[in-house]
Image: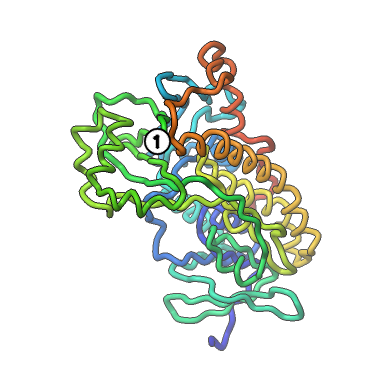
Amino acid sequence: MPDSPIITKCAIAGGGPAGMMLGFLLARAGVEVVVLEKHADFFRDFRGDTVHPSTLELMYELGLLDQFLKLPHQKLETLSAQIGERHLNMVDFRHLPTHCKFVALMPQWDFLNFLAEHGKRYKTFDLRMKAEATELIEEGGRVVGLRAQSREGAIEIRADLVVGCDGRHSTVRQKAQLVGDDYGAPMDVLWFRLARKTTDSAETFGHVEAGKMMIMLDRGEYWQCAYVIAKGGIDRIKAEGLEAFRKRVLEMSPFLADRIGELKSWDDVKLLTVTVDRLRKWWRPGLLCIGDAAHAMSPIGGVGINMAVQDAVAAANRLAAPLKARTVTDADLHAVEQWRTLPVRFTQTLQLTIQKRIISRVLAGGPRPKPPPFFKLFNIFPVLRRIPARLLGVGIRPEHIRTPEIAAP
């Protein structure tokens, strides 16, 4: 055990979207913060890459939007779907009341590196890579810090507040013995990429057939593909063989025939195990969980990154001043949970409804699916496409930057 613990005001476990945004905002407001990221870098494939208009609006409020959009990205302004024989234009972001009327498709590592670099401008920002939280330190029923394994060996961090941002398999959440409810999911997702040609359609779309669903995102040089399978069905899919899986993909998108061979082995296909859950209580004295550590989201709508970022902004808005003054109370932590529960619960309820009423029925097979009557109206009345655009792109109660900025050193 190290002789000299690190002393800080806030220790954040996890350098994902929630952790990096919270660490950046707190440091920007003059709060001493240590962020622990267990990996040596942020480069991990098949993570959420959709940066929604709500998050882009936060970049505008921070004065960073122009710099942010210089990073490689693709703009997603509309979404369409083929359900059985019907092609539907579903979502149109071009009318949102935001500065960016599109979803930016951007590798998550670029997003996280961007936040890290701007966080490092502030002397109160301490990012430690390859440092993984392993234990909580408790005294008198209160969390007062954490222990971690780092490049230098075991370290101890003492903090007025520990924030768990370490994902759906959160160590902090487990060690704090916070209880959650698992709402279930009927599907898992197989992620893979195939080359995109200039002659391909630029449209991002989903395709739904009896027993099958696939989504393709235009990433410039390649298609990011998500093939939806029944929950726990990966062993059966693999038992059928890779060639059978290739045929499944081509049944959904025949134009990929000249490049399907790029799937050379199962190593080229990544399994995303879908979970939808939410903690009954997000905090304990001295500790708060946000992002996936508090509420794992379904991949429906690609809102995971953005919900985590919104949590971070709300937490910073409420906690920056009391952290700086060392006066954080249980009431402050409860207020963060209470404020964020409504949008999280609303979004998860919407996701669970889609899972139950659409995805479960599709994956069960049966006759060729037909779009629900309301969906057909999107083609007849284009203005209706603004409704899902608002729900996906902005949400029911978007957060705004309320924390002050101090001068960079």
Residue farthest front in this picture: 366
Residue drawn at x 48%, y 37% is: 66
Give the quarter of the figure containing the N terminus: bottom right
Identity of the amino acid at label 1? Lys
Relative vertical location of residue 173 with respect to residue 346 in this rendering, above or below = below
Is residue 25 something that shows in the picture? no
4 or 274: nearer the eye? 274
Quarter of the image that includes the C terminus: bottom right
**Front residue (pair 234, 190):** 234
For this rendering, which residue is in front, 268 or 97? Answer: 268
Q: Is residue 6 something one can see in this rendering? A: yes
At a point 39% along the width and 65% down the height, the residue shown is 40
Q: Which residue is mark 1?
A: 212
Give whichever of 347, 397 is nearer the camera.
347
Q: Residues within 10 Å of mark 1 (few under 14, many from 20)?
A: many
Q: Is residue 272 above or below residue 133?
A: above
* Residue 89 x, y percent position in the rendering: 47, 20
Q: Is residue 243 above or below residue 267?
A: above
Locate residue 288 relative to residue 327 in the image: left or right.
left
Q: Residue 248, image x and y in percent?
A: 30, 37
- Quarter residue 387 falls in: top right
Badge 1 element: strand
